Image (spheres, rainbow, N blue to C red):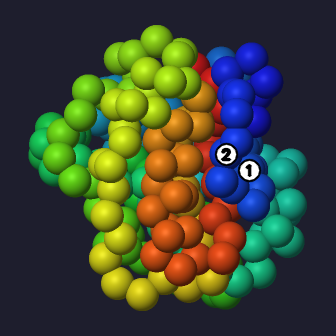
Amino acid sequence: MHGEHCTGELPFASVFAFGYYHDPKLRPIITALKFNGTKAVLIELEKFIESHPRAKDLEGLFLSGTIVPMPLADKRLRERGFNQAALIAHSIVARSSQLESRPDLLIRTGHRAPQSSLEHDLAKRQENIKNSFECKGPVSENIILIDDVATTGATAAEAARVLLNAGAKNVNLVCLAIGA
C-alpha cells in the first residue's frame, strides 16, 4: 500500500489497486459513487476496469475465491441507497466465472463516524472501526475483499481480521484506489 499512509502490520495476503485516488480518471468515478450517490457512473466504472492495463493482472491473480464487498452500516446504506463496494464487486465478478460473490458474508455492526471524516491517522481509524464487523456464515479459504478506497487500511484490516478469525486462510484486498 501507499507508504506515506500505511504503517504497521496489515493482515492481507495481497493488495491490488487500480490506481491512486487523485488519478483524474478515477477520482470522479469514486466521488460520484461514494459522495454523490450517483449510480449512473457504473458504466464509466466498468469501462475503467475493463480498459485498465492491470485488469488482466487481476484476472490472473484470483483464479478462484469468494468476493466480499466491504459492507456499509445500515444507516449509511439507507442514506446512499446502495453500497459502492458491492457495485465494484459486481463489476469484477462479471469478469470471471470462477469467483463467487458473497455480499451477505460480512456485515457492519452499528454506526460509526465515517473513516473519511477522520484524519489520516491509523490509530484513530483503527479505534473508530474496532469491532465493527461480523461474519455471517461459512467462509472459504480465499477471500477477495473489495473496497473503493484504502487510505490507511484500517477498515479493510479490521474486516480481514474478522474473516481470518472465521476461518479464511487468505484475505486479499482489491480496491479502486489507494490514498485520499
Task: Give x and y (percent) for residue 107.
Answer: 29, 62
Task: Give x and y (percent) for residue 78.
Answer: 13, 46
| Between 96 and 40, the one nearer to me in the picture | 96
| Between 57 and 128, the one nearer to me in the picture | 128
Task: Give x and y (percent) for residue 70.
Answer: 43, 54
Q: Quadrant of the C terminus?
A: top right
Write down the quadrant of residue 98 in the picture: bottom right
Which residue shows up at 52% across the image and 58% down it?
161
Q: Residues within 10 Å of mark 2 (few under 14, many from 20)?
A: some
Residue 18 visible, this angle: yes
Taking the image as shown, residue 81 lies to the left or right of residue 15, namely: left
Task: Of the two numbered discs 2 and 1 on the same chain, state the one appearing first in sequence.
Answer: 2
What residue did someone put label 2 on? 10
Task: Give x and y (percent) for residue 73.
Answer: 23, 47
For badge 1, the amino acid type reads Val
What residue did someone put label 1 on? 15
Residue 87 visible, this angle: no
SS category of the residue bearing label 1 = strand
Residue at the far top: name it. Answer: 119
In the rendered structure, find residue 112 and report the number of the disc placed on it. none
